[in-house]
Image: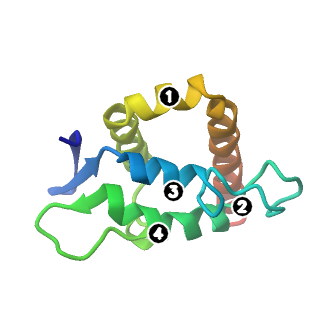
Amino acid sequence: MRKQGTVTIDDRKLIVKELTARHIIDLTTEGGLLGSQEDEGENNNTLSLAAIADHAKRFLPQFLELDGVTEPVTVDYLLDLAPSELQRVYKEFEEVNAVFFEVARNVGLGQLLEKLKQQAQAEFLKLLADL
């Protein structure tokens, strides 16, 4: 059975689900977020925040849902969250998907995951600076 956890934000429960083996394969093969190594930034090891958002549109409904709501969680919903709320969602995702992160580190995806995290943080800070 897939693990899941919840994060409560403004009296709404966001359900965070464990990735399935199929999700992991989809994420790590060509066309998936971690499998994309096309030239989307200044070098082949970076993804723009826009590219991450495009991938998120496809993958979010597979592991995030709002309790009692039939529509999938969207990127727009997440963009309206405060950074502290996003951090809580990410920490829950990390906890529910601990096995995925352990396997990723063991097979060498750890560096890619770290680069992806750093790139997303840099893009987010750049967006804030432009405000």
Q: Report the amino acid beneath label 2.
A: Ser
Query: Quarter holding the N terminus?
Result: top left
Q: Disc 2 vs disc 3: Cβ atoms closer than 8 Å?
A: no
Q: Name the residue under label 2.
A: 48
Q: Label 3 to label 1, Cα distance in Å? A: 15 Å
Select label 2 or label 4 by which is in front.
4
Q: Mark 1 points at which residue?
A: 103
**Neighbourhood count class around disc 4 (C-alpha, 10 Å): few under 14, some 14–19, many 20 upward:** few
Q: Is mark 4 on a helix, strand or loop?
A: helix
Across and down, in percent, residue 6 comes to 21, 45
**Neighbourhood count class around disc 1 (C-alpha, 10 Å): few under 14, some 14–19, many 20 upward:** few
Q: Label 3 to label 4, Cα distance in Å? A: 10 Å
Question: Going by the image, does 38 lie left or right of 81?
Answer: right
Q: What element carries label 3?
A: helix
Q: Label 2 to label 1, Cα distance in Å? A: 25 Å
Which quadrant of the figure has residue 77?
bottom left
Select label 2 or label 1 by which is in front.
1
Q: Label 2 to label 4, Cα distance in Å? A: 16 Å
Across and down, in percent, residue 124 comes to 64, 55
The residue sitting at the bottom extreme is 71
Q: Name the residue under label 4.
A: 58
